[in-house]
Image (cartoon, rainbow, N blue to C red):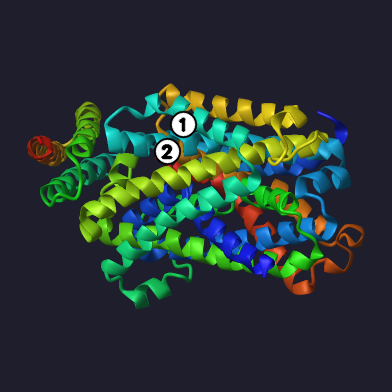
Amino acid sequence: VSGSLASFLRPFIRLLSASVVLTAPAACASGPDLDTELATVRSWTATARLAIAERRAGATTATYTRQLGDRAQSVLAEARRTLGPIARTAADRQHAAWALDSLARALRALDEAARP
Amino acid sequence: MKKWGEVALGVVTSIGGFLEVGSIATAAQGGAEFGYQLAWAVLLGVAGLALLMEMTGRLSAASRRTYVDLLRERFGIRVFMAPLLATLIVSALVLASEIGGVSIALQMATGVAFRWWAVPVALVAWLFLWRGTFSMIEQGTAALGLVAVVFAVGAWKLDPQWATLGASLLPSAPSHDPARYWYLAVSILGASISPYLYMFYSSGAIEDGWTAEYLGVNRVTAWVGNLFGGGLNLAVLVVAALVFAPRQIRVDAYEQVGLLLGSPLGHAGFALLLATLCITCFGATVEITLAIAYMLAQGFGWPWSENLPPSEDARFSLSYTVAVIAAAVPIALGVDPLALTSLSMTLTAASLPLTVVPLLVLMNDAEVMTRYANGWVANLALVVIAVLSLVLFVAALPLQILGGG
């Protein structure tokens, strides 16, 4: 890197390094969070319900609804893996089970709605 | 009369050009998670982009040279390499995201996985560039991009609370999850104020043969076009706020975006949404590819013009050929288009000072600008944008770490 380019970039690099160094420990300290994971599962349950309503109203196609169902299935599989280790108390486990069960039921209904 | 025809065309181009995969994704995410609360970020992005486009357009019309060309001459090749490399990297990421946007729209329409569409989309874009002229690209994508008006119709049919929306045009403290709120604000700004947009605009002014007589055309095109384009972006946010937010749906995948217009507009809404995503992302694909080739050719002094046959500007043509094919690779390999879009919007925001700060110098250079240099109002506005760009530079990556997940 030439002298003038280095001197032009130096303040930018220092600022950037400082901001990343200050925030990285906070990000590393917080692993997967139960509330965030549950919010994701609930969001996909609501997505599946909206997709069912739109499919029944004839707004969307069976092809699209199936894709959305496949995507939601992969979210459900991922959530089943991640929620176990982070739901530590009995109450947390109960909430996680309800959320996963709701998504699974919504996906069964979505699968039916996706049939042409 | 011809000039005002160009104004109309320029305005239409800006409407189609403003909306693309980044602005659709970030506005949908913002609306879904924070309702109308991030409307101010859209407005700020519109104002920032309009200001930068007006200035780079004025720079080109007054000097008959592009911003990149002047950047290199005024600061020398060594300093010029920093904005060039930063802009090339973020533009390449945004280009890959746009190819991803077209591919995901085609996937939603056909059921064929998006990764299979990446290379065909890149080849069609390349063919368009190889065979087309600048005006064909400008007019073709502009006219088709008007399909994006469907978002405004959808927002209108959902009957938004206008007073609340109006109040949200002023920044307010986040109602929850501040890291995510500021991350989305930065992403919305990154999607709006992309360096490729004002660099493309500056090159377009030279392609269209603008002179100082076109300064009025430039001003109206930059401001009115971006206001309309920003209005459509705001409509995306409003629709997401009214369809997704009450159901607590977070946009984690592009497939969810397909549900936005089904509720207010039925099947027509769904079909036009897919058409909007496909057309606006394809238009952006062509423009970014061209912007990358413009930057390289103007930076290194190669012959360039989209109006020349490829044999007369071989290195320029080779640049866009390599850029568009290379950008298709991550999507063809299955990289998640939404994750790529989010990252590229954050990095775009972080790269802004490298192209905004030098513009402040050039717009006050009497040798370059003659009597069209910035007045104090324009300078003050540009200083505000430069300070904003520095804030985004410092905040973008930490917010990506803290709020991007």
**Which of the pair B10/B159 is nearer the observer?**
B10
| Residue B216 percent across, percent down from the top left | 71, 70
**Vertical placement of residue B316 versus B229, above or below:** above
Question: In whole angstroms, how far apart are the C-alphas of marks 1 and 2?
Answer: 7 Å
- From the image, tell me which residue sits under label 2: B102
Q: Residues within 10 Å of mark 2 (few under 14, many from 20)?
A: many
Q: Relative to B51, is B262 on the left or the right?
A: left
Nearer the observer, B304 or B130:
B130
Tell me the quarter of the image containing the C terminus of chain B. top left
Say what amino acid the circle numbered 1 marks: Val
Tag 1–tag 2 contact (CB < 8 Å): yes
Task: Please give left or right for residue B103 compared with residue A54 in the image.
Answer: right
Q: Is residue B312 left or right of residue B230?
A: right
Q: Position of residue B89 (x, y in %)?
A: 62, 34
Q: Quadrant of the N terminus of chain B?
A: bottom right
- Using the image, determine if residue B310 lies above or below residue B144: above
Residue drawn at point x = 33 percent, y = 54 percent:
B33
The kind of secondary structure element at disc 2 is helix
**Circle 1 marks a residue in which chain?**
B
Q: Which residue type does callout 2 highlight?
A: Val
Read off the residue under disc 1: B121
**Quarter of the image where one finds residue A61:** top left
Q: Residue furthest right?
A: B367
For the point 55% across and 46% down, the residue is B396
**First reached walking from the N terminus: tag 1 or tag 2:** 2
Residue A91 visible to the viewer: no
Q: Please give the chain letter of the residue carrying mark 2.
A: B
How far from the left and from the top, in percent, is residue B300?
Answer: 81, 34
